[in-house]
Image: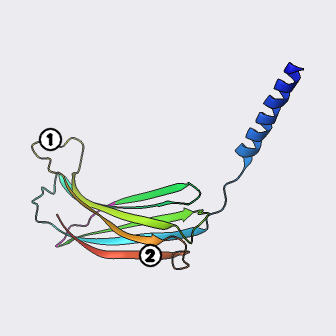
Amino acid sequence: MKIKSSLYALMSLLALATVSANAQPPAPNVSATLTATFYITLVTTINTSTQEVFCSLSASVEDSSGTSYTESSYAIATAGSPYKCVVSIPVAWYLANAAKDTMAVTYVVGIEPTSLTTTASTLHARTSSSNVIGIKAAPTSINQGTIYLGPVDVTL
């Protein structure tokens, strides 16, 4: 009898695992593209042959169900006075309680080496970062559209 009940328990677990493995996640109910434009004034001297200016944007949300999402994107700035950097993140999330969830948006703007072979004597890295804004995740204004964050003025 013990073998039969153990076998039955094992078969039940396998059946449950198969159902879970075949279950499809719910379709996203929050989707948008976040776009930020950064105007970067350099007060730090850089060597444009070994360094570049970049920007990154990150959006995250922790749903009341315990599921969390984080999306990030990165771009190289276009040289100018000021430098200009545009970065976008497409997001598509399923949030069980989207009306109450808040998306946190942060950015980093900085100077980085153009290659990994840059020597320590020519390396000068610097960053500036901040929380851009907290956005309610569910309002219809975020769904199926583009949210423009900025312009953001940064001095490095």
Q: Which residues are magenta?
A: 75-81
Q: Is residue 19 above or below residue 68?
A: above
- Characterize the local packing of mark 2: few (<14), some (14-19) or many (20 or more) Cα atoms within 10 angstroms: some
In the picture, residue 81 is in which quadrant?
bottom left
Residue that numbered label 2 is attached to = 147
Residue at x 22%, y 52% (from the top left corner): 112
Q: Which residue appears at 85% of the width and 29% of the height? A: 8
> Which numbered disc, 1 or 2, marks the residue closer to the eye?
2
Three-letter amino acid code at disc 1? Thr
Instruction: List the single residue furthest toward the front.
Output: 2
Q: Residue 64 appears at what percent x and percent y?
A: 56, 60
What quarter of the picture does the N terminus occupy?
Answer: top right
Q: Which residue is mark 1?
A: 119
Q: Is residue 7 shown above or below 56?
A: above
Q: Is residue 80 magenta?
A: yes
Left or right side of 35 for 5: right
Between 81 and 89, the residue placed more toward the observer is 89
Give x and y (percent) for residue 92: 55, 64
